[in-house]
Image (spheres, grey):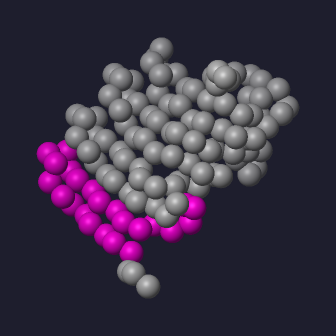
């Protein structure tokens, strides 16, 4: 089964106040992509108009900018973000349902740690 893919800038794509994505008036299921200067800069997976599945962003030179997984509109598991030089900039760990942040780590462009945070265990 192939995944339906649309360009987020297509005039048939709309979004409501609740950030639900529609294509030709129907809640969209598939991948929505965005291009800048001819380069793929984002790919977001939707289920019935809600972000659900892999999310990836790139800088216009093709370097990975961020990646993670959304579940029913919430970030779930691990999200990572990179500096333009390719070094890891941040790592955020969310609960499986996306409702609780469990940990946050950040690094500067040279790879030096600048932040480390862990949720208090109950």
Rendering coords of residue 111 (x, y %): 16, 48
Q: Is residue 60 above or below residue 116?
A: above
Q: Residue at x 41, y 50 (%)?
A: 79
Q: Is residue 111 magenta?
A: yes
Q: Which residues are magenta?
A: 97-119
Q: Quadrant of the N terminus?
A: top right
Query: 97 or 42: which is nearer to us?
Result: 97
Rendering coords of residue 83 (x, y %): 28, 40
Residue 6 visible from this viewpoint: no
Quadrant in which residue 23 is drawn: top right
Q: Is residue 1 above or below residue 115?
A: above
Q: Residue at x 57, y 26 (%)?
A: 33
Rendering coords of residue 11 (x, y %): 74, 22
Rendering coords of residue 64 (x, y %): 35, 32
Quadrant in which residue 32 is drawn: top right
43 on left or right of 52: left
Q: Residue at x 53, y 31 (%)?
A: 43
């Amino acid at each position: 089964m192939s995944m339906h893919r649309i360009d987020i800038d297509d005039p048939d794509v709309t979004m409501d106040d609740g950030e639900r994505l529609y294509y030709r008036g129907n809640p969209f299921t598939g991948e929505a992509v965005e291009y800048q200067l001819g380069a793929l800069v984002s790919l977001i997976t939707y289920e019935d108009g809600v972000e659900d599945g892999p999310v990836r962003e790139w800088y216009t030179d093709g370097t990975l900018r961020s990646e993670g997984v959304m579940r029913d509109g919430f970030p779930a598991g691990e999200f990572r973000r990179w500096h333009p030089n390719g070094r890891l900039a941040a790592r955020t760990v969310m609960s499986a349902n996306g409702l609780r942040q469990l940990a946050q780590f950040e690094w500067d462009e040279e790879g030096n740690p600048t932040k480390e945070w862990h949720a208090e265990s109950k």
